[in-house]
């Protein structure tokens, strides 16, 4: 018996079907991450991963929104405190899941632009864009985006091997 059965009147078949679908989705995402991490991906693969991450996050946000709509039907007035807590948690997660794709979209778009220029045999235009010219000021990458906390621009050949190597936009303040 699962936690859902203990709370509501769901049948084991319903719960098993939901769990099976989510297990398959998790396994597919885990396999994609493993494949992506096994070697240096191509630009096309990295773009596909960014697009896939956006789609998966959006699908998870939709799932959480359905959970928010359904929770009041599962928890009655006798469980109002639990319902309030569950809804607050689900709203917070929903916010993160809907914000993630918005934050990832510019990277996906930059990868697409770079891929389109590579396919056409051209370079990303920057000769007429003063924001992309070298000189004083914050470092920018090859597409004009700021590189926070870095002294040099990031170009398309840099390989970042692990999450620990990824620069943080707002590093936490650590005491000595």
Image: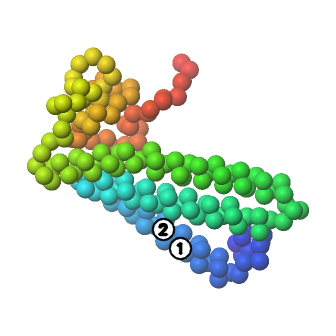
**Residue 105: where, in percent of width, then height?**
39, 48
Q: Is residue 110 visible?
A: yes
Q: Is residue 110 above or below residue 84?
A: above
Q: Quadrant of the C terminus?
A: top right
- Where is residue 81, by image quadrant? bottom right
Circle 2 residue: 25
Measure how far apart labels 1 and 2 are at the Cα level: 6 Å
| Front residue of this view, candidates 150 and 138 | 138
Q: Is residue 74 left or right of residue 48?
A: right
Circle 1 residue: 21
Coloured how?
rainbow
Q: Residue drawn at (70%, 67%), measured in percent from left and top?
A: 70
**Residue 61: where, in percent of width, then height?**
56, 58
Q: Residues within 10 Å of mark 2 (few under 14, many from 20)?
A: few
Contact flag, marks 1 and 2 (Cβ < 8 Å): yes
Q: Is residue 170 above or below residue 17?
A: above
- Where is residue 78, by image quadrant? bottom right
Q: Residues within 10 Å of mark 1 (few under 14, many from 20)?
A: few
Q: Residue drawn at (52%, 70%), measured in percent from left and top?
A: 23
**Residue 12: where, in percent of width, then height?**
68, 81
Per the rendering, the mark at residue 106 is none
Q: Is residue 42 above or below residue 146?
A: below
Q: Is residue 150 above or below residue 3?
A: above
Q: Is residue 30 visible?
A: no
Q: Residue furthest left?
A: 121
């Amino acid at each position: 018996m699962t936690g859902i059965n203990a709370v509501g009147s769901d049948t084991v078949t319903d719960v098993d079907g939901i769990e099976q679908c989510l297990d398959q989705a998790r396994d597919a995402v885990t396999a994609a991450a493993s494949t992506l991490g096994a070697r240096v991906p191509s630009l096309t693969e990295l773009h596909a991963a960014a697009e896939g991450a956006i789609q998966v996050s959006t699908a998870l946000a939709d799932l959480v929104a359905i959970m928010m709509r359904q929770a009041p039907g599962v928890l009655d007035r006798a469980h109002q405190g639990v319902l309030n807590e569950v809804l607050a948690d689900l709203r917070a997660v929903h916010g993160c899941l809907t914000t993630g794709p918005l934050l990832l979209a510019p990277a996906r778009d930059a990868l697409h632009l770079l891929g389109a220029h590579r396919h056409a045999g051209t370079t990303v235009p920057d000769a007429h864009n003063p924001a992309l010219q070298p000189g004083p000021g914050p470092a920018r990458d090859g597409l004009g985006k700021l590189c926070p906390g870095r002294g040099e621009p990031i170009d398309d050949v840099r390989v970042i091997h692990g999450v620990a190597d990824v620069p943080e936009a707002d590093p936490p303040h650590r005491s000595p």
